[in-house]
Image (tube, rainbow, N blue to C red):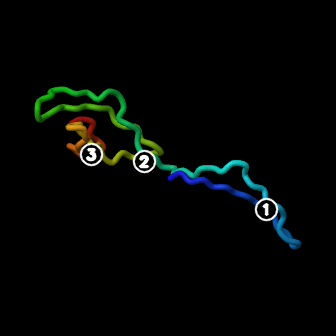
Amino acid sequence: QDTDYSFRVSAYNRIGQGHSKEIDTPVKAKSPFSKPGQPSGPLNVSNLTRSTVDLNWSSSPTVNDIPITNYFVEKFRDGIWIKVARLPPTSTSL
């Protein structure tokens, strides 16, 4: 979650603390991790019937060397997305 932080530094000696120097603008702390990108290339649809479909795609790029753990296939029906399959990361087809 993005959070704003400000920092300042001051020096000390045996007499006491000097004036602080503060950064001019707060900075945002962000997670070094992020979600994977969308699958590469086109999403190919073939052999479509009322109850089945063949889908093919290219794998998603990894982000920060974090491996893909699953793919979820969803269909859009009656105005909502419904999950229809959870596939292992080595799959690029259904």
Q: Of the residues under marks 2 and 3, which one precedes in the sequence? A: 2
Spatial CA distance of label 1 from label 3 is: 53 Å
Local crowd size for mark 2, using a 10 Å CA cut-off: few (<14), some (14–19), many (≥20): few
- Residue, x 69% and y 48% (percent of image)? 25
Disc 1 marks a residue whose amino acid type is Ser
Q: Of the residues under marks 2 and 1, which one precedes in the sequence? A: 1
Disc 3 marks a residue whose amino acid type is Pro
Residues 45 and 7: in front is 7
Q: How many marks?
A: 3
> Is 37 left, or right, of 83 in this rendering?
right
- Residue, x 34% and y 36% (percent of image)? 59
Q: Which residue in the protein does label 3 denote?
A: 88
Q: Position of residue 93 (x, y in %)?
A: 24, 35
Q: Which mark is residue 10?
A: 1
> Is 75 left, or right, of 38 in this rendering?
left
Q: Nearer the viewer, mark 1 or mark 3?
A: 1
Direction bottom: furthest residue: 14
Q: Which residue in the protein does label 2 denote?
A: 66
Secondary structure state at the residue bearing disc 1: loop
